């Protein structure tokens, strides 16, 4: 019989590459890790690890077991949480991963409402951009992941194995310096009107979308600066060093000084969602978190 504790140890050994490093990650001794791995190999009747010096390498059977471990552990966690809720335990834990502009806009509103309604529920927040945040969810390292994808982009099936809660649709806008020729434009402008400008690009996924949209408009943007930090993008535009395209939600997350926002045509939108594993979607604390994120999304200016 395979035990969940053995699977957690196997995943730790696979990710760290050694018994000692896995022990440090799990808060136990190296001999304890070794004993649990021997017990697991005995249970399945085949070697799971090949020991090469100080490092460990997974066998084919080990790779298969690690691949299934995240789903198994998630299912057990869901069962434990739901049973505890049924038994009347008013407590819960949610590990949330969000991209930066979501962390500063959607998340604070949602978590404040969650704490007021369910003070016993604890939420642990980390930041990561998709696709990394989605990888963390699939690997069992978080319970809810905020993510986004652009309308019409390839890979629409990438979330088919997950429970998807739509939060809002976010439109991209252009940022130009206050003294720019388009700063006082009423209505929207074609992105082709910015073809000769210097560009400041954002996160890798947004950067790729920018290049794709510009190519469709018949030009390749000259990117002079690239940064994942939205306040830095705004600061560079405000200093007159170029123009940028950012999601409206990202603009809401900073204080844009010295810049103007301009609506773009054709409209480019991204879908912002909260993701979880299907089993975890049944856990009361996770459900409550998803509900509050959806309410926060519905009240964002970017959603109107």
Image (cartoon, rainbow, N blue to C red):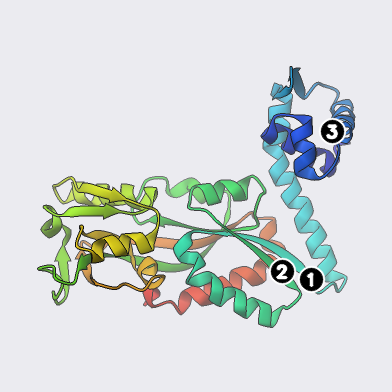
- In front of the other: 8 or 222: 222
Would you identify the image quadrant in which residue 284 lies?
bottom right
Separation (CA) of disc 3 from disc 2: 31 Å
- Say few, some or many: other residues with alpha carbon within 10 Å of mark 3 (under 14 / 14 to 19 / 20 or more): some
Viewer-side label of 3, 2:
3
For the residues labelled 3 and 1, the Cα–Cα distance comes to: 33 Å
Q: Earlier in the sequence, mark 1 or mark 2?
A: 1
Horizontal relation, residue 289 to residue 240: left or right: right
Query: In the rendered image, which quarter contains the N terminus?
Result: top right
Residue that extends furthest to the front in the rendered view of this protein: 239
From the image, tell me which residue sits under label 3.
30
The spot of residue 212 in percent (x, y) is 26, 47
Left or right placement of residue 161 versus residue 281 in this view: left
User: Image quarter for residue 283?
Assistant: bottom right
Q: Which residue is mark 2?
A: 122
Camera-side residue: 199 or 81?
199
Dot 1 and dot 2 residues touching (CB under 8 Å) = yes
* Image vertical order of residue 134 relative to residue 23, above or below: below
| Residue 77 point in image, percent of width and height | 77, 55
Q: Is residue 160 visible?
A: no
Residue drawn at x 32%, y 66% is 171
* Residue at the disc numbered 1: 91
The mark that comes first in sequence, 3 or 2, is 3
Q: Residue at x 20, y 58 (%)?
A: 241
Mark 1: give few (<14), some (14-19) or many (20+) Cα within 10 Å: some
Q: Is residue 292 left or right of residue 73?
A: left
Element type where label 2 sits in the image: strand
Frontmost of labels 1 and 2 is 2
Q: Are marks 3 and 1 in contact (CB under 8 Å)?
A: no
- The secondary element bearing badge 3 is classed as helix
Describe residue 59's horizontal placement relative to residue 199 as left or right.
Answer: right
């Amino acid at each position: 019989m395979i035990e969940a504790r053995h699977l957690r140890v196997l995943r730790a050994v696979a990710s760290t590459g050694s018994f000692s490093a896995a022990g440090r990650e799990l808060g136990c001794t190296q001999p304890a890790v070794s004993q649990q791995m021997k017990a697991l190999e005995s249970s399945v009747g085949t070697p799971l690890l090949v020991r090469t010096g100080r490092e460990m390498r997974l066998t084919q059977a080990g790779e298969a077991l690690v691949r299934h471990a995240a789903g198994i552990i998630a299912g057990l966690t869901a069962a434990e949480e739901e049973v505890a809720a049924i038994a009347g335990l008013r407590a819960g834990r949610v590990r949330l991963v969000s991209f930066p502009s979501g962390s500063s806009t959607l998340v604070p509103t949602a978590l404040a409402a969650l704490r007021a309604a369910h003070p016993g529920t604890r939420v642990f927040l980390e930041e990561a951009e998709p696709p990394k945040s989605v990888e963390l969810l699939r690997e069992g390292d978080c319970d809810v992941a905020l993510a986004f994808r652009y309308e019409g982009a390839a890979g629409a099936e990438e979330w088919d194995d997950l429970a998807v809660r739509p939060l809002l649709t976010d439109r991209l806008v252009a940022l130009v310096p206050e003294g720019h020729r388009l700063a006082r434009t009423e209505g929207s402008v074609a992105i082709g009107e910015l073809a000769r400008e210097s560009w400041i690009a954002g996160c890798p996924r947004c950067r790729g979308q920018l290049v794709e949209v510009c190519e469709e408009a018949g030009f390749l943007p000259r990117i002079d600066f690239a940064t994942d930090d939205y306040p830095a993008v705004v600061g560079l535009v405000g200093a007159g060093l170029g123009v940028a395209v950012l999601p409206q939600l990202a603009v809401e997350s900073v204080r844009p000084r010295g810049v103007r926002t301009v609506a773009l045509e054709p409209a480019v939108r991204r879908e912002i969602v909260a993701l979880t594993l299907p089993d975890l979607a049944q856990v009361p604390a996770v459900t409550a978190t998803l509900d509050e994120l959806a309410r926060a999304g519905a009240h964002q200016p970017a959603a109107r």
